Image (tube, rainbow, N blue to C red):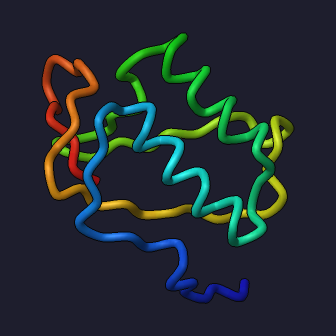
Amino acid sequence: MDIHFESGLLSLNQDFASPEEGIRYAGELLQKSGACTPDYIEEMIRVYHEFGPVIVLDTGVAMPHARPEKGALKTAFSVVVTGTPLVFHHEEFDPVNV
């Protein structure tokens, strides 16, 4: 397996008004790298609205995602670190900054 680092998929010290804004930004990094379509970004936001904070995996860490058939073009993930943490309304692991 060939694994390489794409610096365009890492963004530090970002601030967002809402979880949706952060999800969209992370998705746009994926789209710019050729990893997904705009539909995938919209599906990540829809999944968050439908299932809520289940995308928050651990203290401070969320992993928005969608089914690959919803617009994924290749395997990739973006990492966004916020300057000000976001509240996803997870009882145990809020607030989120990654």
Horizontal side, residue 97 vs residue 36: left or right: left
Point out the image quarter for the C terminus: bottom left
Q: Is residue 13 left or right of residue 95?
A: right
Q: In which quadrant of the rendered view does residue 85 lie?
A: top left
**92, 87: nearer the viewer:** 87
Q: Residue at x 56, y 28 (%)?
A: 45
Residue 58 place in picture, x, y as percent:
24, 41
Residue furthest top as drawn: 50
Report which quarter residue 68 is drawn in.
top right
Pick out the residue farthest to the front.
Answer: 17
Counting every numbered tag in the picture gives 0
The spot of residue 57 in percent (x, y) is: 32, 38
Q: Relative to 3, is 91 above or below?
A: above
Position of residue 52 relative to residue 71, above or below, is: above
Percent coordinates x, y for residue 92 in the rendering: 13, 24
Residue drawn 61% across and 21% down?
Answer: 46
Position of residue 73 measured from the top left corner of the image (x, y, whole percent): 84, 58
Quadrant where the N terminus is found in the figure: bottom right
Of 97 and 21, nearer the camera is 21
Residue depicted at 63% across the width and 85% down the height:
3
- Measuring 70% from the left and 59% from the top, which residue is drawn there? 31
Q: In this view, does 76 lie to the left or right of 79?
A: right
